[in-house]
Image (cartoon, coloured by chain):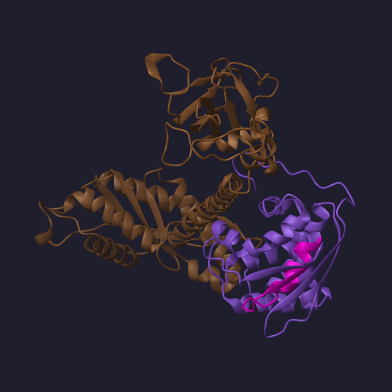
């Protein structure tokens, strides 16, 4: 498991549920409180232990937490770099949805050793997308559901985003665009601030 | 309508291709059409944005752009056959562009100027920022947006790498410090003393060496408890440090045992005086656990200059022997070591 996954979980718990929540979760999961290194490999068992501990502490389900994590990755100021990298995917939300097939490739460009399963996108009707995520990374469907909901907001688009239960074939996410001009899109300058964008 | 030369016939005309100005603008947002007279007759929307405020239609190409890399020729006309070109806006901000010019022909086969397609090249990021360009400024075939994505991803990961390296370097320095420090007193530990002795003997730097053992410390521990004992040790360590200089090394090597390396101090008389001062200072009362504690110290010392080839273990054991002579003679004494004759280049002074 890539350290980035656990690191983002740590940042999410700290920023959304408070430092004391992270400290309790880290202790319950047997992780040093100082935290996880994003660029060092991580035992997948640690991810699972962190999620169980976080679910027990917050009273949310694992899927609920992972969806919130997805929203956090796009919308929290600390994660501005992630949101910017995602916005490179498309001019509008529909364009972005179509580009999700490229997501594993984009992630690989950014972090070569972070491997995501294949994603296929079918536009079944205008404004109606069916996203299929191949199996391989447990919980990815829930995180991506949160990411998509936050990205729709970011683009100022009103969309219905629902996830079908995980099956052996992977996860299906249904995206129905209701109103692409629902709200003002958040500004995105193609060339961001130079230097460290984080 | 513009009509490029057919493939394989750079200089000639032939069956061509008709393309509307609007389609051309979508296909190549950074294109420029220059007529046979050297005047601009068309430009893509992104290029117009880059030339913000500069009238293009009908303007002379060489009045708007300067050809880079022409050297002393000073000729800003496009090469007759077209080809690769490097341009720069004559007006501020003098944005640099590069691209390819191909000759155009009329339906009758007469030369009809050029079609030039441009790109920002490696200055992409600056150009996009300067001219506030969006994704729509680039054709979908252009990898400009992917390049910007990659650049941004790279710098984000690089920043994280730098932070990780800083944390690792700090952790390493701290681990090294801890590995060489006695936790209770903050003095050097045995390992640090071994390293210092090794360095001094290898480097041939002369030094004096003292082995210090506290007297009456056991009574403090037994009557006032370990907490008081620890406080006494910490205070004794502080006093030892107080009586040494920056280049000296003071180490705690056992429960109440210390070794002191005095850099450059080799004369027995000077070492004996230093040992007496240390004993006198350690004999001053120490407040611990609300009680006044009194301890003393016994010292054995030696000097690196007494040995032909000083070896750390030999010096330590001689200082240790001298220390036990001090103990035998009663507490609060300092004794100079007497290295075995084989080790000494000359007889040690008394």
Q: Residue B296: x and y, percent? A: 45, 59
In front of the other: B157 or B38: B38
Q: Is residue B224 above or below residue B59?
A: below
Q: Is residue B17 above or below residue B12?
A: below
Q: Residue B317: x and y, percent? A: 25, 65
Q: Identify which residue is drawn at 50% across, 52% down.
A: B238
For residue B44: magenta?
no
For residue A144: magenta?
yes
Residue at the far bottom in the pictured view: A168
Magenta range: A129-149
Q: Colour of chain A?
A: purple
In front of the other: B314 or A38: A38
**Picture quarter with the N terminus of chain A:** bottom right
In front of the other: A35 or A51: A51
Q: Is residue B209 above or below residue A124?
A: above
Q: Colour of chain B?
A: brown
Q: Identify which residue is drawn at 40% across, 43% down.
A: B245
Q: Is B134 displayed left or right of B61 in the figure? A: right
């Amino acid at each position: 498991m890539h350290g980035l996954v656990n690191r983002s979980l740590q940042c999410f718990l700290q920023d959304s549920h408070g430092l004391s929540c992270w400290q309790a979760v880290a202790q319950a999961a047997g992780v040093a409180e100082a935290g996880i290194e994003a660029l060092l490999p991580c035992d997948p068992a640690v991810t699972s232990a962190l999620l169980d501990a976080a679910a027990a502490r917050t009273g949310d389900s694992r899927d609920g937490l992972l969806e919130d994590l997805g929203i956090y990755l796009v919308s929290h100021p600390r994660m501005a770099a992630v949101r910017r990298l995602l916005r490179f995917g498309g001019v509008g939300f529909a364009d972005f949805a179509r580009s999700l097939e490229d997501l594993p490739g984009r992630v690989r460009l950014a972090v070569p050793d972070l491997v995501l399963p294949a994603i296929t996108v079918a536009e079944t009707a205008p404004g109606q997308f069916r996203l299929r995520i191949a199996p391989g990374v447990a919980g990815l469907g829930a995180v991506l559901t949160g990411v998509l909901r936050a990205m729709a907001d970011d683009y100022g688009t009103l969309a219905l985003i629902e996830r079908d239960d995980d099956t052996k074939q992977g996860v299906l996410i249904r995206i129905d665009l209701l109103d692409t001009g629902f709200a003002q899109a958040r500004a995105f300058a193609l060339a961001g601030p130079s230097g460290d964008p984080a | 309508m513009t009509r490029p030369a057919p493939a394989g016939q750079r200089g000639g005309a032939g069956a061509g291709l008709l393309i509307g100005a609007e389609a051309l603008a979508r296909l190549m947002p950074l294109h420029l059409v220059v007529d046979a007279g050297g005047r601009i007759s068309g430009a893509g929307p992104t290029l117009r944005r880059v030339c913000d405020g500069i009238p293009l239609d009908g303007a002379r190409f060489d009045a708007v752009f300067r050809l880079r890399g022409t050297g002393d020729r000073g000729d800003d006309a496009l090469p007759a056959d077209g080809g690769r070109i490097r341009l720069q806006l004559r007006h501020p901000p003098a944005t640099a562009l590069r691209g390819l010019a191909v000759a155009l022909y009329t339906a009758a086969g007469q030369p009809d100027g050029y079609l030039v397609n441009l790109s920002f090249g490696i200055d992409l990021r600056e150009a996009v920022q300067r001219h506030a360009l969006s994704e729509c400024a680039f054709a979908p075939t252009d990898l400009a947006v992917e390049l910007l994505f990659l650049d941004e991803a790279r710098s984000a990961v690089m920043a994280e790498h730098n932070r990780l390296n800083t944390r690792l370097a700090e952790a390493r320095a701290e681990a090294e410090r801890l590995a060489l420090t006695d936790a209770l007193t903050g003095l050097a530990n045995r390992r640090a003393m071994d390293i210092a002795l090794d360095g001094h003997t290898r480097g041939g730097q002369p030094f004096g060496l003292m082995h210090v053992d506290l007297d009456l410390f056991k009574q403090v521990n037994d009557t006032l408890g370990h907490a008081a004992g620890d406080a006494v040790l910490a205070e004794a360590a502080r006093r030892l440090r107080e009586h040494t200089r920056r280049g000296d090394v003071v180490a705690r090597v056992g429960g109440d045992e210390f070794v002191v390396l005095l850099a450059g101090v080799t004369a027995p008389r000077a070492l004996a005086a230093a040992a007496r001062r240390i004993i006198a200072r350690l004999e001053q009362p120490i407040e611990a656990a609300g009680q006044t504690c009194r301890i003393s110290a016994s010292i054995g010392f030696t000097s690196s200059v007494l040995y032909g080839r000083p070896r750390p273990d030999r010096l330590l054991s001689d200082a240790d022997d001298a220390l036990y002579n001090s103990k035998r003679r009663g507490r609060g004494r300092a004794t100079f070591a007497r290295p075995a004759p084989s080790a000494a280049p000359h007889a040690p002074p008394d």
